[in-house]
Amino acid sequence: MASKEFELTFPWGIICGKTWGDPNSLPILMVHGLQDNADSFDNLIQLLPKNSFYYICIDLPGHGKSSHFPQGFSFVLLNYVETIKRIVDHLKLEKFYYIGHSFGGHLGTFFTGLFNDRVIKLVIIDTLFESPIPYELTSEFISDHMNRMIQLEEKLLLKTAPVYKYDEALKRTIAGRNHVLSEAGAKTLLQRSLKKIGNGYRFSADQRLKLSIPYILNYDQQKNIINNIKCPFLLISAFDSLEVVTKVKKYHCHLFEDVKNFKYYIVEGNHSVHIDHPENVAPLISEFLLSGISHL
């Protein structure tokens, strides 16, 4: 299956992405994790059903080929959820499937809980729902994040982003992960995350994303949104992820214990399992997506 590039225009700039398959087939929106891009699903899509679905992979704002959010913009989880809403409305996807990895899984989960008449089935890969900020640390956490964001913006405005040789960019991409990413996997991501500058390359990702996206919602608010999910819901965790053994199982059990049609599996691999070992997740996803679809 070959892919086709697309570009959508929004008030802050453009959202870029790529599609696979027949536009007349059932649409699946695929959303990557922080500092990844649409190419992170290339290997997985090759192992998913080819005739039943139309795969739509996007670059989130500040990732891949998409525009950055404006300077001074406050990075909050729900702003990205709203971005998903704008994208599916622009594409006129009244009903669609959703596959998200990591941060893309967070966005899909909250979008589905907020707009539960839109998503037919939800799949999230190695998405960790963080424990909420303790009540007594709320003020300290928010003020600290605001200060660090403003300081980083001021620092970025005073210097020009560095230019690297390709091999240097490749090494930085691999070394910058808190999990193992193969050289082949890093090369896949670099196809959309580098800009050619003279004889070198510059990373296209918004450097403000290094501060991550704060989770302001408390446990009860998260659970209220998640409990509003009505569609079949599949969560796949990678066994070697740093968090999965110590945090994910316990916290997910509480968050998802009241969600109907929820399935949870742990597979061999690490956080980038869908890039480096898509064969570990593709059968579970394919079976889940195809269940209940008539092929007559």
Image: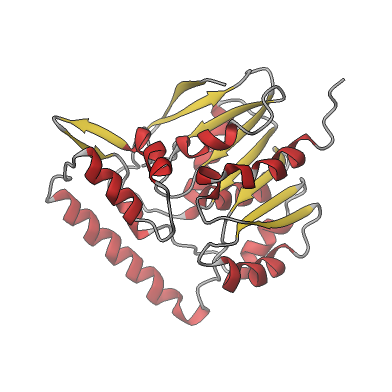
Say above or below: 193 vs 125.
above
Look at the image and tell me whether residue 40 can be seen.
Answer: yes
Residue 149 lies in what quarter of the image? bottom left
Q: Residue at x 22, y 30 (%)?
A: 196
Q: Position of residue 39 (x, y in %)?
A: 46, 35
Q: Quadrant of the C terminus?
A: top right
Q: Residue at x 50, y 50 (%)?
A: 272
Q: How many marks?
A: 0
Say above or below: 101 vs 22.
below
The residue sitting at the right extreme is 296
Q: Quadrant of the N terminus?
A: top right
Which residue is nearer to you in this view: 42 or 74? 42
Answer left or right for 151 relative to 279.
left
Say above or below: 291 vs 212.
above
Q: Position of residue 263 (x, y in %)?
A: 76, 54
Q: Position of residue 195 (x, y in %)?
A: 26, 33
Answer left or right for 145 relative to 91.
left
Say above or below: 197 vs 76.
above
Look at the image and tell me whether residue 12 can be seen.
Answer: no
Q: Residue at x 43, y 50 (%)?
A: 34
Q: Position of residue 213 (x, y in %)?
A: 43, 57
